[in-house]
């Protein structure tokens, strides 16, 4: 079996950690950073952006996806997610920050569930990698709407 290209895991974790600096979180204080690797090799970044009306707030992962798609990239290999209530500059986080259900659904739109890699990290040394299929089994995606 042909092995896929190695993921730039360390670079993705560093970028995701750095994005926590830009999180706008006056309500939760929970800073999330994301680094999304496009098939073009570009890493698209995102942070969470909250809102006084709560619902309009956006997660870090969806910020990264919408930045990428709005710049013409629709194919992705992996995303790294980091999150926690620690200081914006923290490079070591206490817990993993798994993606919320809505973000998993957005991933389903653009990613192959059995191929797309989700890197959950607490630091550059501590991380776990899952496929989208593992975190979102039997997800509903574009294929379900295809005419037979
Ligand atoms: N959050 C994310 O950015 N990504 C997730 O997948 C889970 C939750 C954000 C939303 C909100 O700003 C804060 O974390 C607390 O829920």
Image: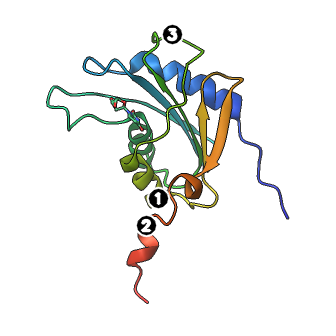
| Earlier residue among tags 2 and 3 | 3
Q: Is residue 130 above or below residue 112?
A: above
Residue at 59 percent across and 14 percent down: it is 91
Q: Secondary structure at mark 1?
A: helix
Residue at 44 percent across and 44 percent down: it is 65
Q: Residue furthest front?
A: 95
Residue that badge 1 annotates: 108
Q: Secondary structure at mark 2?
A: loop
Residue that badge 2 annotates: 141
Q: Secondary structure at mark 3?
A: loop
Q: Residue furthest left?
A: 53
| Earlier residue among tags 1 and 3 | 3
Residue at 41 percent across and 40 percent down: it is 67
The numbered dot on residue 142 is none
Q: State which quadrant residue 29 falls in.
A: top left
Residue that badge 3 annotates: 89
- Please state, as top left, top right, bottom left or bottom right, where the C terminus lies in the image: bottom left
Numbered label tally:
3
In depth, the one of 68 and 62 nearer the eye is 62
Q: Are marks 1 and 2 in contact (CB under 8 Å)?
A: yes
Q: State which quadrant residue 35 falls in.
A: top right
């Amino acid at each position: 079996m042909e092995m896929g290209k190695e993921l730039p895991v360390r670079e993705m974790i560093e970028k995701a950690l750095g994005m926590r600096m830009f999180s706008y979180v006056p309500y939760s204080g929970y800073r999330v950073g994301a680094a999304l690797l496009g098939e073009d090799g570009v890493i698209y970044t995102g942070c969470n952006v909250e809102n006084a009306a709560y619902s309009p707030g956006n997660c870090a992962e969806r910020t990264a996806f919408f930045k990428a798609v709005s710049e013409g990239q629709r194919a992705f290999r992996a995303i790294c997610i980091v999150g926690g209530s620690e200081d914006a500059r923290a490079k070591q986080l206490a817990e993993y920050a798994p993606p919320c259900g809505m973000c998993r659904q957005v991933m389903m739109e653009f990613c192959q569930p059995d191929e797309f890699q989700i890197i959950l990290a607490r630091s550059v040394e501590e991380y776990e990698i899952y496929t989208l299929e593992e975190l979102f089994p039997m997800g509903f995606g574009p294929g379900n709407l295809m005419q037979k």
